[in-house]
C-alpha cells in the first residue's frame, strides 16, 4: 500500500485503538526515548556528591544552560532532575513504539546565539533543520480547490501568495517585516542582561552608583535604536494585535496567520491589549543567522537538551535524572545552603539555582515564613492561566490537504515542513475560540498549529509514517462547573480537533495510529508547567521585565540569599531561549566571587 507503514501500522493499530495519554499499557508512561535520553549522570562516571559549589534544581534547558556556565566559570555544579529524562519541556519521547515525539516544545528559534557559540553546541551534536517555507494556512471555502497562504523567506514568492487575497497587503508586507525587524533589533540586548535594579541606582558610594548606572545601558541602547519611531513601537507593545494588523493589512487570512504568534501560549484574544508583545517575543529569534527563522531539531527537541547536557558534562558538571528535590536547605541566617532530596539525601552548596517555576520554587521548596509576605502574595497572584492542549499523533501517511493535495509518490511537499495553521481564516475565529474557553468550555473550532517534523527528519518515524504535533488553543485549565479533565473530556476535545483537521485534510482520522493528549493539567503534572502555562506565567506586560517574577526581584536573586531563579518564570520569559539560565548563572557567579 503506497505511502503507508504496512505491517508496522497494522500491528500498532491492533494495540492502540483510540489511545490517549491516560491509557498507555503498563510501563509506557516511561518510554525509553532516544539514545542518551535517560541519564543516571552525565560525563565521566560520577556519583552524587554531598557538597558542590552550586546545585541546579531541574534539568530543563535553562537549568542545563545555567549549569554549563557555572561549571565553565570553575564552580563545581550538580543538576538534579525529578523525571527520568532530561530537558524539561524540551524532550524527545517515544510515546508510540517507533515514533519519536518532541512531546512538549517542538520548534527552535529563540535560543540565544551567544549560547550556541559559548557552549559549542554544534560540536556537541546539535543539528537544526531550517524550514523554508515556514507557514501554510489552508482555507475552508466553497471554491475548488480552496485557496491557501504559503509564507517563506523568498519575499517575491510570499508577496505573490498574499496577492491572492490583497494586492495592497502584498505591497505592504515587506515594510511590515522591516518595521518589526527594527523593533526586534532594538529590544534584543534587553534579553541578555538582568533588568535594571532601580533600587540600587541611588545607593552606595559615588563609585558604586556610577557602576550601577551601567545597568541602564541596554535600556538606553533600545531607546536610541527606536528613536523617533518609539511611539509607534510603544503601540505595538501595548495594543491588541488586531489593531496593529488592521493598520497594516486588510486580508483576514494574512492577519489571522500573523495573529497566531501573538496569542500562542496565551489565554488571550487577538483583541486583548498587550497581545502585540507576545508576537514580538516569537519573532525575536534567529536560526543560522536568519532573523525570525524557526526550525526543527534533528532527533527532536530532546537532542537540544542532550547537546547542552554534553556541553556541561564535558566541563565536569554532574547531571542526574530521577533525583527529585524536596526542599531547599537553609542556614541559621536564612541563606540557601543546598537541597534535600525526596529520598532524604542532603546535598550542600553555596549557591542554589532553581529551574522550577516561581510557584514551585517559592511556595513548595522554601518555607513560607522565610519569605516576605508581600512577595509570597505576588507569587500566588502570578497569572498562569493556560489555553494550550498539546496532542502528539502517530500517522501512517502524510495529511493531504484539499488546498494542496499530496503528490502520487507520497513524499513530503514544501508545505508539509511548515507550521500549518488551521481554523485561521480570520481573526474573529480566533476570538470566538478564546471566548468559549474563557467561559470554561474547550473551543468548538480551536486554533490549531499542525507541524510534521518527520517531513524534514524522517528518522523520527518508521518508513512511510510520520509524527504530527498539534499545538491547540483554546482549552481552559479548569472546565466549567469544576469538571475535571478526565479521559472522557480529553478524548472529546481531541476528537473535536481531529474532526477539524479532517475538514481540511480528508482521511486524516483514518491515518491515526496513536495519540498522546496533554491538557493544561497534564502539562503541569508531567513537566511542572504551572497551570499548564508554557511560559511559567503569562507574558503580559505586567509580568515582564521589572515585574518578572515580582517587582524588586527581577534580577534572578530571590529573598533567600544564595537562591536564584533561572527558569522561564524569570526575565526574559518563556520559549526555548536559554537567556534566563545564562543570565542567572552570570549573576550567581558574580555573587560567588564575593562569598
Image (cartoon, helix red, strand yellow):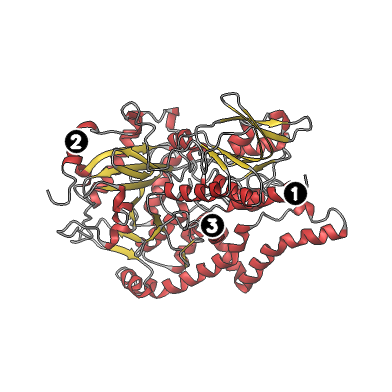
Q: Where is residue 396, by image quadrant?
A: top left
Could you give the CA–CA distance between mark 1 and mark 3, rounded to whole angstroms? 36 Å
SS at mark 1 in the image? loop
Horizontal and vertical percent position of residue 195? 67, 54
Horizontal and vertical percent position of residue 362? 64, 35
Which numbered dot is residue 11? 2
Which numbered dot is residue 593? 1
Specify few, some or many for label 2: CA neighbours under 10 Å numbering under 14, 14-19, or 20 or more.
few
What residue is shown at x 35% (from left), y 72% (from top)? 159
Q: Nearer the viewer, mark 1 or mark 2?
A: 1
Could you give the CA–CA distance between mark 1 and mark 2, rounded to whole angstroms? 59 Å
CB contact under 8 Å: marks 1 and 3: no
Give the residue number, with chain letter if any, for mark 3: 277
Q: Where is residue 457, by image quadrant?
A: bottom left
What residue is shown at x 31% (from left), y 48% (from top)? 460
CB contact under 8 Å: marks 3 and 2: no
Quarter of the image that includes the C terminus:
top right
SS at mark 3 in the image? helix
Left or right of 192, for residue 126: left
SS at mark 2 in the image? helix
Q: Earlier in the sequence, mark 1 or mark 3?
A: 3
Specify few, some or many for label 3: CA neighbours under 10 Å numbering under 14, 14-19, or 20 or more.
many
Amino acid at each position: 500500500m503506497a505511502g503507508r507503514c504496512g505491517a508496522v501500522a497494522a500491528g500498532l493499530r491492533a494495540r492502540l485503538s483510540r489511545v490517549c495519554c491516560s491509557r498507555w499499557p503498563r510501563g509506557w508512561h516511561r518510554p525509553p526515548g532516544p539514545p542518551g535520553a535517560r541519564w543516571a549522570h552525565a560525563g565521566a562516571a560520577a556519583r552524587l556528591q554531598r557538597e558542590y559549589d552550586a546545585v541546579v534544581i531541574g534539568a530543563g534547558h535553562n537549568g542545563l544552560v545555567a549549569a554549563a556556565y557555572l561549571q565553565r566559570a570553575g564552580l563545581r555544579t550538580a543538576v538534579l532532575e525529578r523525571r527520568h529524562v532530561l530537558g524539561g519541556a524540551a524532550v524527545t519521547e517515544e510515546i508510540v513504539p517507533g515514533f519519536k515525539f518532541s512531546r512538549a516544545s517542538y520548534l527552535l528559534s529563540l535560543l540565544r546565539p551567544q549560547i550556541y557559540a559559548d557552549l559549542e553546541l554544534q560540536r556537541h551534536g546539535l543539528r537544526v533543520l531550517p524550514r523554508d517555507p515556514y507557514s501554510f494556512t489552508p482555507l475552508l471555502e466553497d471554491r475548488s480547490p480552496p485557496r491557501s497562504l504559503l509564507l517563506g523567506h523568498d519575499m517575491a514568492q510570499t508577496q505573490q501568495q498574499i496577492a491572492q487575497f490583497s494586492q495592497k497587503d502584498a505591497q505592504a508586507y515587506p515594510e511590515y517585516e522591516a518595521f518589526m525587524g527594527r523593533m526586534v533589533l532594538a529590544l534584543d540586548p534587553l534579553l541578555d542582561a538582568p533588568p535594571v535594579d532601580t533600587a540600587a541606582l541611588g545607593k552606595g558610594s559615588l563609585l558604586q552608583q556610577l557602576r550601577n548606572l551601567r545597568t541602564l545601558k541596554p535600556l538606553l541602547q533600545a531607546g536610541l535604536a527606536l528613536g523617533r519611531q518609539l511611539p509607534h513601537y510603544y503601540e505595538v507593545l501595548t495594543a491588541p494585535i488586531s489593531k496593529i494588523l488592521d493598520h497594516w493589512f486588510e486580508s483576514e487570512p494574512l492577519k489571522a496567520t500573523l495573529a497566531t504568534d501573538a496569542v500562542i501560549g496565551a489565554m488571550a484574544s487577538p483583541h486583548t491589549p498587550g497581545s502585540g508583545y507576545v508576537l514580538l517575543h516569537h519573532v525575536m529569534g534567529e536560526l543560522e543567522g536568519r532573523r525570525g527563522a524557526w526550525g526543527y531539531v534533528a532527533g527532536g527537541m530532546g537532542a537540544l537538551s542532550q547537546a547542552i547536557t554534553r556541553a556541561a558534562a564535558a566541563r565536569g558538571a554532574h547531571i542526574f535524572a530521577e533525583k527529585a528535590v524536596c526542599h531547599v536547605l537553609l542556614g541559621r541566617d536564612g541563606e540557601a545552603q543546598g537541597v534535600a532530596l525526596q529520598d532524604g539525601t542532603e546535598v550542600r552548596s553555596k549557591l542554589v539555582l532553581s529551574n522550577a517555576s516561581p510557584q514551585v520554587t517559592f511556595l513548595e521548596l522554601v518555607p513560607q515564613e522565610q519569605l516576605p509576605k508581600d512577595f509570597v502574595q505576588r507569587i500566588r497572584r502570578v497569572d498562569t492561566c493556560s489555553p494550550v492542549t498539546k496532542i502528539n499523533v502517530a500517522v501512517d501517511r502524510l495529511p493531504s490537504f484539499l488546498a494542496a493535495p499530496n503528490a502520487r509518490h507520497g513524499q513530503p511537499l514544501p508545505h508539509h515542513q511548515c507550521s500549518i495553521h488551521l481554523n485561521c481564516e480570520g481573526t474573529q475565529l480566533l476570538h470566538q475560540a478564546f471566548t468559549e474557553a474563557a467561559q470554561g468550555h474547550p473551543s468548538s473550532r480551536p486554533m490549531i498549529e499542525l507541524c510534521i517534523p518527520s517531513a524534514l527528519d524522517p528518522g523520527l518515524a518508521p518508513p512511510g509514517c510520520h509524527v504530527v504535533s498539534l499545538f491547540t488553543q483554546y482549552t481552559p485549565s479548569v472546565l466549567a462547573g469544576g469538571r475535571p479533565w478526565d479521559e472522557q473530556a480529553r478524548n472529546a476535545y481531541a476528537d473535536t480537533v481531529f474532526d477539524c483537521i479532517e475538514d481540511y485534510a480528508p482521511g486524516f482520522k483514518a491515518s491515526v495510529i496513536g495519540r498522546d493528549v496533554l491538557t493544561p493539567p497534564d502539562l503541569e503534572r508531567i513537566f511542572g508547567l504551572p497551570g499548564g502555562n508554557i511560559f511559567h506565567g503569562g507574558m503580559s506586560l505586567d509580568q515582564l521585565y521589572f515585574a518578572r517574577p515580582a517587582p524588586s526581584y527581577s534580577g534572578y536573586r530571590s529573598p533567600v540569599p544564595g537562591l536564584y531563579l533561572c527558569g522561564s518564570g524569570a526575565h526574559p520569559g518563556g520559549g526555548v531561549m536559554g537567556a534566563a539560565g545564562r543570565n542567572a548563572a552570570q549573576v550567581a557567579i558574580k555573587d560567588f566571587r564575593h562569598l
